[in-house]
Amino acid sequence: MARWGRRIVLLLLAGWGLLLLTRCHLPRQVVRPTPDSTSAVYVVRHGWHAGIAVRRADVPDTAWPILGDFPAARYLEIGWGEAGYYTGRSRGIWGRVRAGAWPTESVLHVVPVTREVHERFGAQTVVRVPVGPDELEALTTFVAESFAVDSTGRASFVAPGYYIRSRFYASPLPYHVFNNCNHWAAAALEAAGCAVWPRGAFTVGTVMEQAQTCGTLVQQARPD
C-alpha cells in the first residue's frame, strides 16, 4: 500500500510539472548575434531577480504602451515577476510558495532612469551587453509582448513601484517555478543576441553569469 502511495504521489508530481511546463508562455523573439553593435542594454541585479535597462531613444515611440508615462527618462529599466510577491502584497513563506507552486498573475516593474544606469543603481551589479539593430528590435518586441494592454492599446497600471516615479503594470504571462522572473530576464538576453538557455536560468546568479558571456561587467555590487 505504501509503495502504491508513493507511486501515486510521484505521478501527481510529474503531472504537476508537465502542466506547468506546458504553460510556459515566454514570448519568443530570437535573432542571431551580429557584429554590428551600435547600442547597448544593461542587466541589473536586484536581490533575487534581474532587470533589463534599455535606452529610451532606442525604443520606437509606438513600441511600448508605457512610454508616454516616462517622458524624461534616459533609460527604462524593466523587471518581471509574480503579481502578489513583486508588488509586496503577498510576502513571507506563503507568498513564496504561492508564487511558484502554480500559475499566478504577473506584473512588470518599470523604473525611469535619468542618468547612467550604473549611477542610478550604484549598489547593484550591472552588466553592459552590446546590441545591434536586429537584436535591439527583437528585445524591444519581447518586452512589448510582456505588457497587458486594453482595447485602446494602453498598459494596465497596477501600483506604484519601488523607486521615485517607477510603476507596476499588468502582464499577460503566467508566473510559476518553471516560468519565473529569472527565466524572463534570460529570455530577454536571448532576444538581445546572447547564446543563453532561458529554461535553465532558475536563479539570478545564472542570469548574471550568462549576461557576462556576451557582455561586460561594469559594476560589482557593494558588499553588505
Image: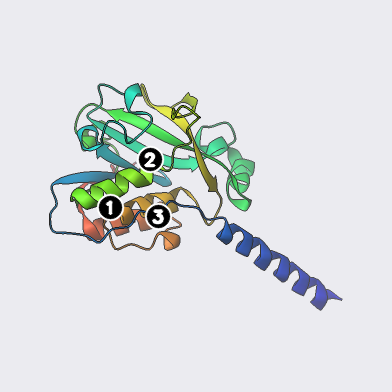
Residue identifier under label 1 = 192
Q: Is residue 160 visible?
A: yes
Q: Earlier in the sequence, mark 3 or mark 1?
A: 3
Q: Earlier in the sequence, mark 3 or mark 2?
A: 3
Residue identifier under label 2 = 144
Dot 2 amino acid type: Ala
Mark 2 surroundings: few (<14), some (14-19) or many (≥20) residues within 10 A:
some
Q: Is residue 128 above or below residue 60?
A: below
Dot 1 amino acid type: Ala
Horizontal relation, residue 104 to residue 152: left or right: right
Q: CA distance from mark 3 to mark 1?
A: 11 Å
Horizontal relation, residue 8 to residue 21: left or right: right
| Residue that protrudes farthest toward the right in the picture | 1
User: Front-most of 222 and 171?
Assistant: 171
| Residue that protrudes farthest toward the front in the picture | 151
> Which disc is residue 28 wearing?
3
Percent coordinates x, y for residue 82 in the rendering = 53, 41
User: Front-most of 158 and 138?
Assistant: 138
In which quadrant of the rendered image does the N terminus lie? bottom right
Q: Quadrant of residue 41?
A: top left
Q: CA distance from mark 3 to mark 2?
A: 11 Å
Element assignment for label 2: helix
Q: Which residue does the image show at 64% across and 43% down from the upper left? A: 94
Q: Is residue 126 visible?
A: no
Percent coordinates x, y for residue 65 in the rendering = 38, 31
Horizontal relation, residue 83 to residue 39: left or right: right
> Which disc is residue 36 wearing?
none
Q: Is residue 211 above or below residue 98?
A: below
In which quadrant of the rendered image does the C terminus lie? top left
Horizontal relation, residue 135 to residue 161: left or right: left
